[in-house]
Amino acid sequence: MGDAVQPLLALSSLSCHYGKTPALRGVDIEVNEGELVTIVGANGAGKTTLLRAISGVLPIHGGSITFEGESITKMAAHHRCEVGICHVPEGRLMFADLTVADNIYLGGYAHRRDKSWIKKGTEWVYELFPILQDKAQDRAGTLSGGQQQMVAIGRALMGRPRLLLLDEPSMGLAPLLVADIFRVIRQLNQEEGLTCLMVEQNAKAALKIAQRGYVLETGGVTLSASASDLLANEEIRKAYLGH
Amino acid sequence: MGEVFLQSLITGVTVGSAYALVGLGFAIIFNASDVVNFAQGEFVMIGAMSAVSLLAVGLPFVVAIGFALLITVAIGMMLEKFAIEPAKSATVVSTIIITIGASIFLRGAALLIWGKNFHSLPAFSGEIPIHLGSATLTPQSLWVMGVTALMVLLVRSFFKRTVTGKAILACSANPMAASLMGIPVRRMMLFSYGLSAFLGGVAGVLIAPIAFTSYDAGMMLGLKGFAAAILGGLGNPMGAVAGGVVLGVLESLGAGLISSGYKDAIAFIILLLVLFFKPQGLFGRAGSDRV
């Protein structure tokens, strides 16, 4: 990674707090074009806060966010989607009463006037998750957790991401489905060249498909290394990988 | 007996159409934000009173009505912009209280502008009644029913077919997710208030030739519309429409068959019965599943 390469996303001493409780204290993170970067950390370390700050739904209190070399620190959340930051939120956050097709369609809200993209994007999503095509007219709230996660990813892909933020995509899913979801994320990153920043409790599975990782502890980055180094790191194994 | 019944039915559907439009306005804002907007009735009054004033200064009928509706929409949006949005961190209950305050404010402003006199609009297309057996139907009743039906169909297809309609539903389902999808949540809220105000204004203009309007006419209509929305199940737009018509018919049957003194009481007895025995409304849907 030469210094000449400008990172796609750069967070510089980003801080953020809920009331008086600091949630992020001076976080520096970079994500380069084409990478899959994962953030490992315990519950409450600030992982979700970090992603929400990047997509602008949570106000930040210090530091800056640069995307494609331009500061987006002050940009409104709904504009960040337009520049290509698309977020698969924790807990999936379905539009439960709307159909699966409408959920996916609304993911492309920022590009709603680009009919050819809407058509192409929808085909892409159904190709990645064929089951969703069968369920297209069902209310999203009636789907299983795994199918909802597919809708959540599909919805974000409709936003034509330059950077895909994934918040706990495996949360609450059966092991078989987890493998499915990770396979798709890996495919998106390696075959389609999509840049991803993923937060995941299941650190082992995440590090296996990621190139680099950051360890986040009580709102600060304590370690940054390649995914394979983190997988091999004794302390990380003990703390986050369960052995 | 039969003729009283038929006549009550006609009157009931006419008045019920106005309740339906007000109820629809309630449902739209409730859907977008879980807030019951108690200034909804004031939109009806503002629509009617503005039309009366604009007609009095000599504007042609259609132009006067067009501007009256514009004024109503503007006031609806201003309500959102200057009273609801600044309190965005307030709870739903506080926001509802803000709308009650806004309704009192709007009524007071109307009193200052228009005074205490009753006003009326001329009928849209003459007063020659149509005879249906022993009952009569005024042309204005047809206008009320026809325009209401048209509005209901338009609103329905707006939410079912257009991207903006779906985006508003998305904001109500999950504002954060909507925001992550690039949907400007505040602008959608502004739009919802504008749309509700528009429907209220339409109701006001439609019934002003039938019922007199005054600065406080919105209060009773607002409550009836609220009863309609509850009857149909809050948050169910088509339920609110059906609730409005049912309420209008029952009210008018009660007035015709029992005594006209009970007209308003009937609406509120129904409201209470629904709240006691079927709080989700006659056509209410079960809460949405969250897995």
Image (cartoon, coloured by chain):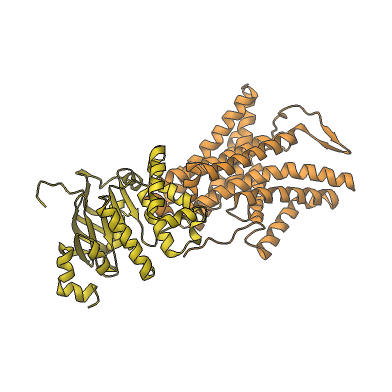
Chain colours: A yellow, B orange
Visible residue check, residue B189: yes
Please tell me whether residue B56 is drawn above or below residue B165 in the rendered image: above
In the rendered image, residue B168, in percent from the top left (x then y), is placed at: 48, 47
The tally of labels here is 0
Indicate whether B219 appears above or below A200. above
Residue B153 image position (x, y, % from top left): 62, 41
- Quadrant position of residue A130: bottom left
Tell me which corner region of the image, top left, top right, bottom left or bottom right, holds residue A186. bottom left
Whether residue A51 is visible to the viewer of this picture, yes or no, is: no
Q: Which of B196 and B52 is in front in this view?
A: B196
A67 sits to left or right of B60: left
Q: Which residue is drawn at 20% across and 62% down?
A: A213
Residue, x 65% and y 25% (percent of image)? Answer: B61
Q: Residue at x 43, y 60 (%)?
A: A148
Query: Is B175 left, or right, of B41 in this rendering?
Result: left
Q: Horizontal placement of B206 versus A71: left or right?
A: right
Residue at the outermost left position: A3
Place of residue A86 in the rendered image (x, y in percent of width and height, measured from the top left): 33, 50
